[in-house]
Image: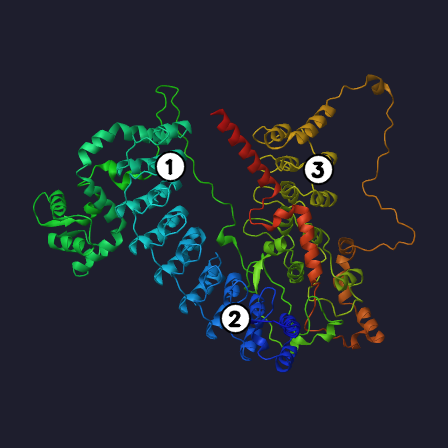
Amino acid sequence: MSSVATCRLHELQIYRLLQRVRARDTVQVEKLLRAGVHDLVNITEPHEGKGVLHVAAVANDTDMIEFLTLRGARPDVQDNRGCTPVMLAAELGHDGVVALLAEKHADMKLTDTEGKGVLFYCLCPTKRHARCLQVALNNAADVNNVSHAGMPLFLQACENARECEGMCLSLLEKGADPNSVSQVTGRTALMEAVRAGAVGLVRAILKRGANVNMLDNKRFSAVHFAAEGGYLEILQVLSAYVADMGVTTAEGNTALHYAARRGFADCCRFLAQRGCNPKQKNMEGLLPRQIAKDLDHKASVKELKKAERLNGKLLKNYTNESWALTLYDWSHENEAELRKAFEFASHGITNLEVVSFECFVSVLQNFQAPINDEHIRKILLAHDKRRQGLININDFFKGLRYLPRTLVMTSYELKKTKKRAGKSGKNKKKSKLNLPMPICIVPPENVYRRDDGGPPHFMIEKYQLVTDRNRFDQDHPPKHPIEDDSAWYTDGPEKIYININDCVKAGDTESLKMAFRQKVPVDVKDRFYKTPLMTACASGNYEVAKFLLNLGPCECCFQLLISPFTASSATCATSLDYTMDYRADVSACDQFCWTPLHHACHAGQLDIIKLLVEAGAAVNKPTFSGATPLMRAIESSRPCCVDYLIKAGATVTAENKSEQSCLDIARAYADFRIVELIQAKIDSLHKPKDHKKDKAVKHQAKPRPATSTPIKEKGAVPTPQASEYFATSTGKTEAQANSVILHSTRITSGALKKVDISFVPKTVWGKQLTTSQLVEKKEKRRQRFTYEVDFDDFRMPFNKNVEKKALELSQIFEQSI
């Protein structure tokens, strides 16, 4: 029970208390409870009737709930809608709050003003709501609660059985009524489970004793809903529990009418075989076959015609043998349990095939099979024609000894389509053998580990920042590296090795930098022959692609390049190789001879294409199939990329090995804009020459020297490159290193007596992105790939274009039929 604030003083104090509870200010809450009106902790505000526990439960604040209950807050306080704190917590999926309130003896049987208990608020398809439901069930919540509107709890759960099937099974195990009926529509829980297509729940409800032949207010049964949804397996289960397949609705429709309307041919066949009359007309005078024909369901029309033709014969031959169909469906449904019972009755013999008469009859009687003694005698005669007193249970479950082959379930399995025989004679064509194409990867025996026994080079160590999270984080880094002394008292994490291309996709440049400092080649290939630059281009990661193309030696190594004999001894851990090329190779190829430019064009990323072309990528490099980067851009249907490549010198007249030109590919993959671009470029190549201009004297350009020196700007100091220095000083390095004069000069200058006192901190902070920078990065990614990039069904431009073209072709094909 709760008391609503009635006077002005009570209202002011309860609103102030609720404000402090929301702010989690326990000091002020304690002060208000001590100095406020009597029993303030259980008073509710007058507008919505919320109390302190309601606010804390909605906020998922278990600490505040524990604090308030220790000071006398009652967990059963109800607001104006009759909701208790545990109902609000269950509705939001706060399983921790529900468990805590259950420990505080919250009453799980209370209902709100609509007559709904706490279990109604748990019906939501999340794991947190499932845990809330389990807590409520363990604390004696009413599983047969019915709202004032006449909706039983179990029935409402079955309405959402497609997402909440586990919850429905839990309610059923705790004693929910399997025959729950809506007082408004007359639908049962079984009907709703059938409508949702939950086969497991349908079986569980029927095993609990549900009436399979109940009708709602419109005379619909579970069979009608199963036929309407096309659930053949559910129809088999209903038939096993002796469902009436021929019942008609208030409009005169049988289950066959609904199966025919939706075009479910297998359901039509099953229903006709199990007693549904295919010649029954509805109130509009339509047969199921006529409905299927009007809606162009050809397979259903074929089955219904066959059913109409055999209807009289079936009625004549199987009217008195309907028990055989019922027995077969029942044995098919309970096959696993019956086999275990046969093994148990035969003293635990596994993989049993033959049982005696006595064992067979006793098991069927124990399971209450839907047959009588006369039917059992016929079964025994059908399975034991030699009178040996034994029955093969495999033959019994197949049903072929007492039923025609067309009525057993094996006849519903998909048959392998027979190949049509070709024409005889010279025109007869041999069928091609289509072998699956294996994925081209590096063989495991060719994947070598590092010299020190570590993983292959494409598996790099992940950068992990070791710091005290209570002092520093990405938004509050240390002002100076020496300030962070966390590494002296914090244990470092274990090394984690990940694929270098996974780092590229995630934009983890810190791990990439650490890998390159550890002498990992920048163009290392993974098991799929892809370099980091290829992966960055394929995934559209501009920042990483730019980082890989702008790589260079660190400052200390650069100083060593300039003056290797006078540089400080405190260089980086990487020993410098003068011949090393630090930048990523824009001409690298994978197993299909794709370059990074091919991948960038395939991904349709204009800025990355510009970056690669400016770095020297070849715009006309063909793959093994003869495709150029321009063809890949055309296939992605990106006009801006196609236009840039044409202006960069891409050849529009190139052909692949299938003799397809760029114009052919554009007509097959791209839209009219790209076709016009390609056509305009081709037309410009075939313009007629002006003969007057040919007669004019052409001024020949002066030949340039083979090696030219770039012009120096004023005040610019030339920087020696590693290759230049290596070319001029390689021969003198050994002699200078052993020179007596050099050692004498170092001794007199005091260079050899210098002691390095520089301090290297244990924790090296990389460029950690702050929260605002991460949000900005996500915004840029959305601008690049649209908002769809946040969803699982996101497609890159090529895949999206192919999917669009396939859909258009399928629509054209359907219209032509």
Pointer 1: what residue? 258
Query: Which residue is farthest right?
Result: 714
Query: Which residue is farthest left?
Result: 387
Pointer 2: what residue? 77
Foreground residue, 302 or 646?
Answer: 302
**Mark toward the start of the polypeptide (2 vs 1):** 2
Q: Position of residue 263 (x, y in %)?
A: 39, 34
Classify 10 Å Cα crowding around label 1: few (below 14), some (14-19), many (20 and above): many
Pointer 3: what residue? 640
In screen coordinates, is 202 left or right of 472? left
What residue sits 79% from the left and 75% below the top? 752
Q: Above or below — where is 798 with respect to 43?
A: above
Q: CA distance from mark 2 to mark 1?
A: 50 Å
Q: Secondary structure at mark 3?
A: helix
Q: Position of residue 581 (x, y in %)?
A: 70, 53
Q: Above or below — where is 248 with respect to 742?
A: above
Amino acid type assigned to the residue bearing label 3 in the image: Cys
Foreground residue, 509 or 378?
Answer: 378
